[in-house]
Image (cartoon, rainbow, N blue to C red):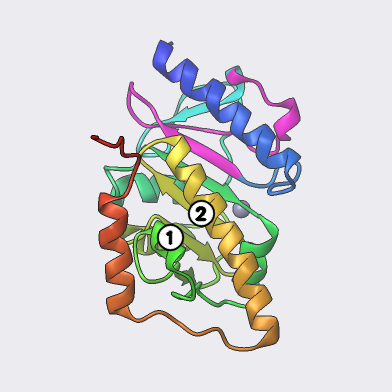
Amino acid sequence: MDDDDLELRIEALAVLQRLDAQGLNRGSTGNLSLRAHAGGFWITPTGMPADELGVADFVRLADDGRVLEGDWEPSSEWPFHRAIYRVRPDLGAVVHMHSPHATALACLRRPLPAFHYMVAVAGGDDVPCTPYHLFGTEALSQAVGVALAARQACLMANHGLVAGGATLAQALKVALEVEALCGIYLQALAVGEPALLSPAQMAEVAERFRTYGRARRSG
Ligand SMILES: [Zn+2]
């Protein structure tokens, strides 16, 4: 097996256990995947709680869904992971959570609008919410593929959240930020209708994000 991929799966295991410990996923809900160097992608097996999972339990799937490596059946939600890798060659990891705040908003079938500038972390003016489709279906994976073509994250109606990134760390960062924003949005909604930023204001944020980062002072 590829050494790079082993490191990736060790990192993925730590992320899954952390999400479980933080209550952002419970038991065997939620999953994640990583684009494999040898082709296709690694995904968590179906029905295995994070605290029982080992690096050897990940399953590598080909782009057509065939199992290439691994002893277990893949997560039943593998079709939407594949859909994302197909439409976004720039993404290397996908994190899916049934985290409380994102899922609550998804159950209202409401997108996360531009109520806070950090919404731009998902790559646009909102985090869309796909229509409801049964988990594991082609219909759901098509809807997620459409949403993720233009964003780093989306909500899935009556289900949860999915986020992608070039690396697992980036996918996780987007997922955690969107989860936190959904919580703040729900709190604001409990009092009234939050004021929204305009497309011009969000474009300004996106521009700032492109140039923002660590910067050593030159003097
Ligand atoms: Zn799910």
The outermost residue toward the bottom is: 192
Is 190 positioned to the left or the right of 203 in the image?
right
Image: magenta residue range: 31-55
Q: Looking at the image, is 3 positioned above or below residue 70?
A: above
Residue at horizontal 33 percent and vertical 21 percent from the top? 38
Residue at horizontal 58 percent and vertical 40 percent from the top? 75
**Which numbered disc, 2 or 1, marks the residue that appears first in the sequence?**
1
Residue 55, image x, y percentages: 59, 19
Q: Looking at the image, is 76 positioned above or below residue 10?
A: below
**Which amino acid is tagged 2?**
Val
> 114 or 214: nearer the eye?
214
Quadrant location, the N terminus: top left
Mark 2 surroundings: few (<14), some (14-19) or many (≥20) residues within 10 A: many
Which residue lies under the disc numbered 1?
144
Cβ atoms under marks 2 and 1 closer than 8 Å: yes
- Per the model, the C-alpha gap separating discs 2 and 1 is 8 Å
